[in-house]
Image: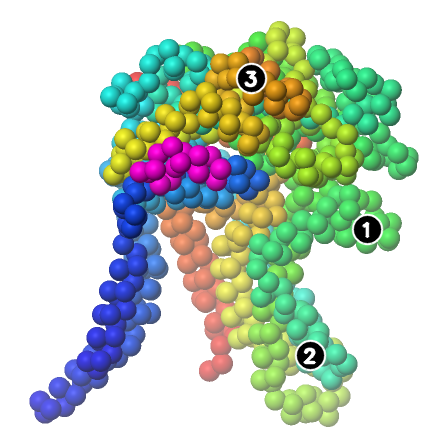
Amino acid sequence: MFRSITFLIICCLLIFAFSCEKNKDSDGKLTITFWHSFVSSTIPALNKLVQKFEDEHPEIHIHAQYIPTGDALIQKLITSIQSKTAPDISWIHADFLEDLVSADAIYKMSYFINGENGLSQDEISKIYPSLLVYSSWQDTLYSLPMEATNLGLLYNKQHFRDAKLDPESPPKTWDELRSYAKKLSIDKNGDGKFDQIGFFVPIYPSSGPLYPWMVWQWMPFIWQAGGYLINEEQTKVLFNMKPGIEALELWKELYLNSNMSTFTTDYDVAFAAGRLSMAMDGPWNLGRFNELLKNVDWAIAPLPAGPVKQATVAGGEYLTIFKQSKHPQEAWTFIKWLIRPDIQAFWSMNSGYLPIRRDVLQNKEYQDYLASNPNLKAYVEQMDYAQTQRSIDFFTLEITRNLAIALEKATLGNMDIKTVLDEAASESNKLLDSVKR
Amino acid sequence: MSKKIKFYKKESFSAILFLSPTLIIFSVFILLPVVFSFYLSFHDWNMFSADKQYVGFDNYSKMLTSAEFWRVLKNTAVYTFCTVPLSMAVALVIAFFLNKKIIGKKFLRTAFFTPVVISAVAAAVIWRWIYDPNFGLLNYVLGLIGIPAINWINNPTAAMSALIIMGVWKSLGSNMILYLAGLQGIPDHYYEAAEIDGAGGWHKFWRITVPLLGPTTFFILVISIIGSFQVFDIVYVLTYGGPLGATKVLVFYLYEHAFKFFNMGYASAAAYILFAIIFILTLLQTKFMRTHYTIK
């Protein structure tokens, strides 16, 4: 009896001993934990980046921890905040800023920027302003981007040649997109089904995990038509106005004309198999595409311009520092280091992501690199008219969902555009009205 | 006397010690969450913040007046009341034949039971391919007998059928095993007596097999309805509740509110409503069926 109890106690102690967190490595280094969900093809580049930082800052050790999918990341963050084991730094998505701020879990960036080891306003102003909108909540900066992304047009040059279209001149307007998509949707064997689709309209189940991705890809179209998702005061959504209707009309037409509901949602695989001619995609896939699209003659072009202007959607990966961190200053050192122009160039060349600041383009080495990587160059050049959505500080998850439902109903459900957008708008406005300001 | 008490004390102490791993796991991972979520269902909580705001019955009343909730409930009911009878009927027929002396009996039993042990997620990935509108096996087979291709996953009506077919496939095996056990419990002399009285195959099945399988049928019915109301994994992987929310079921709805929108209180209320529904259904079944079907 006594022996078995002793045994149990020893087991408990051992488990306890192994689970104790170490703040200092045996060699006296500080450890900064960093959670992220980079696509697996980016991990080698990240390791190189971390190595470079540790070479310059031998007193700090960066422990980069990969958490698959953004959904899992946020769920893990919640648990860790509750159990007081939050990481020092983590990727966060702007949609969750409302909750993180209200829980008092993260630092304001001004705390570090205005601190001893801070950043000058001049330095901050070098960052693309649209990226900073996204990293703020109620006009306060809570995170900083580590890289930029945007959406470009991925297209198959061989398909263009086959259809007697100029492969060096991808569609520049909505009308061209319409006519190109029509010419490139081909029924090769005459069975009444398209064997090749011109343009991939990214419709995903509005109740599934990909609906934010669907809405994100729709946003450039409403901007191109001169509209916005929400008014500046954030009291009313605007996506059911004329620009929103025009943007959804375009999507619906492209969707129905190529009978997209029987098409796969794995657009990259379809593209690799030569069953798809054009799709929207971001720079995070460039590294993967070099392998996947080995046998395809592909290129990246800017998104076509709409009736009002040229626009694409900008995104990025945003880093924030948690209040539970024992070494916030060292965590800040890492973030500050990442913003340095030479590091941004280094990171972009290794990972395929875009720099967060325009002055990186003056870097000679980076210019040479872009000259030999035209696809990356196409993305970088698009940053000049890349936008982010006006921030929605409250109910952003719910409003995005309402819009996703409207997109799905109009295309897959073939329902009236005005009706579904009005429905989504009235649901969203009800939520916005309930916000106590 | 005192010696005896001491003995019992010692006995129960070691009993508790040996049971403690299970008891601890049960309390921490099942009992505690059950109680905690009941408490949460009267609160508004986003999981991030430390304070939980008491809202009384708000979560419940909001849900019962939400049109989406009733649509979700209807989807769940349609899934359950199609899957359960279909699966039970097919399972009974298969069990009946696999109980006879036929060639490859063991292989067939294994084959029918395999879906039960396959992880639902892996199975749903396979079914996504079977249902693929362009390359899918199902449409190919239907094409051979002249039925035009159906867009299984992306058509709101077809998607529910796709889910039901997969649900039947997945639950068939365990129902079949239970029926097999039930069939083997029926003594042969009942059949022999019936044969002497001149009963044919159909009569024997309908008058002897089916009534004597009563308790088994009752058990399977109760278990299957509970299981079907709780369906989640195959929905999550096969259709994501889509298209247009046509296959969104109650547990999926609960999951969305808990882990997408972080309305923990609302999700907990949904869990307790699900509990109430299952509880009432089970109560009704015991009331109406036990008198007929339990062996006295």
Of residue A201 and residue A354, the one placed in the foreground of this image is A354
- Look at label 1 and name its amino acid: Tyr
Magenta span contains residue A52: yes
Q: Is there CB contact under 8 Å for labels 3 and 2?
A: no
Of residue B286 and residue B23, the one placed in the foreground of this image is B23
Is disc 2 surrounded by few (<14), some (14 to 19) or many (20+) residues within 10 Å? few
In the rendered image, residue B127, in percent from the top left (x then y), is placed at 67, 53
Q: Is mark 3 on a helix, strand or loop?
A: helix
Q: What element carries label 2?
A: helix
Residue found at x 60% / y 74%: B177
* Disc sitting over residue A193 in the figure: none
Q: Does B60 appear above or below A356?
A: below
Quadrant (top left/top right/bottom left/bottom right) for the C terminus of chain A: top left
Determine the image quadrant of residue B186: bottom right
In the rendered image, residue A388, in percent from the top left (x then y), is placed at 50, 18
- Look at label 2 and name its amino acid: Lys
Q: Which residue range is magenta in the image?
A: A47-62
In the rendered image, residue B131, in percent from the top left (x then y), is placed at 71, 48
Is disc 3 surrounded by few (<14), some (14 to 19) or many (20+) residues within 10 Å? few
Residue found at x 27% / y 18%: A114
Determine the image quadrant of residue A122: top left
Subunit bearing disc 1: B
- As measured in the structure, the alpha-carbon distance from the residue carrying label 3 to the one carrying label 2 is 72 Å
Subunit bearing disc 3: A
Label 3, on which residue? A364
- As measured in the structure, the alpha-carbon distance from the residue carrying label 2 to the one carrying label 1 is 30 Å
Label 2, on which residue? B106
Q: Does A3 appear above or below B217?
A: below
Is disc 1 surrounded by few (<14), some (14 to 19) or many (20+) residues within 10 Å? some
Magenta span contains residue A359: no
Q: What element carries label 1?
A: helix
Circles 2 and 1 on the same chain: yes
